[in-house]
Image: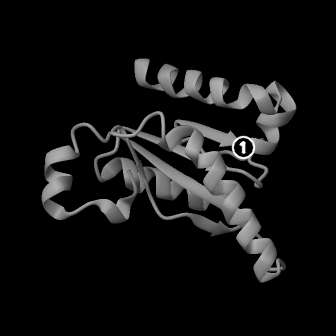
Amino acid sequence: MKFSEMTQDSWAELQLYLDTCLIPYTALSGEQSPVEATEALERLRDFLDLVEIPFKGRIMTYPAFHYANSELSMTLNSLSEQLKSSGFKYVVIMSSDGHLDGVEIPAADLVLSRSVLTHEVGEEGIARFIGEKIRELWKK
């Protein structure tokens, strides 16, 4: 479910079930042309579908964090902490193009990078791997 689909009344009703916040990270540098930025957003959308579709009803997708910066880990960590203090039990960060391996985000419960996963499990294994990781997260 996207944040924009939520009303104050529905949030009060569904907050108990929507315990996982998904933060999309686009990893734009500002050097992309409009066409390249659009393509990056489309790749991110397709990657997010691997979580949003099968786990609809338990995951709330927040607005994307679009631009890479030198304080990325601190920014995403602070955002994760704030989302948890607002009531989310879990925070998942996903990026299709961003390289998040080695980035310290201790407040995030799961960080998924398509480029890393493609290398580790292959394109065909990504959906299954992500599903397993999300379910493991919820068992904690």
Residue 1's x, y, as percent?
Answer: 38, 50
Q: Residue at x 36, y 60 (%)?
A: 3
3 or 84: nearer the eye?
3
**Quarter of the rendering containing residue 45:** bottom right
Is 31 on the left-hand or right-hand side of 81? right
Q: Residue at x 66, y 40 (%)?
A: 112
Could you say which is closer to the camera, residue 99 or residue 1?
A: 1
Q: Is residue 71 visible?
A: no
Amino acid residing under circle 1:
Ser
Q: Is residue 110 left or right of residue 36?
A: left
Tell me the residue that label 1 is attached to.
113
Residue 69 percent across, percent down from the top left? 72, 69
Residue 124 horizontal/vertical position (percent): 77, 28
Q: Quadrant of the C terminus?
A: top left
In this view, 104 is above or below 71: above
In-front residue for pair 133/79: 133
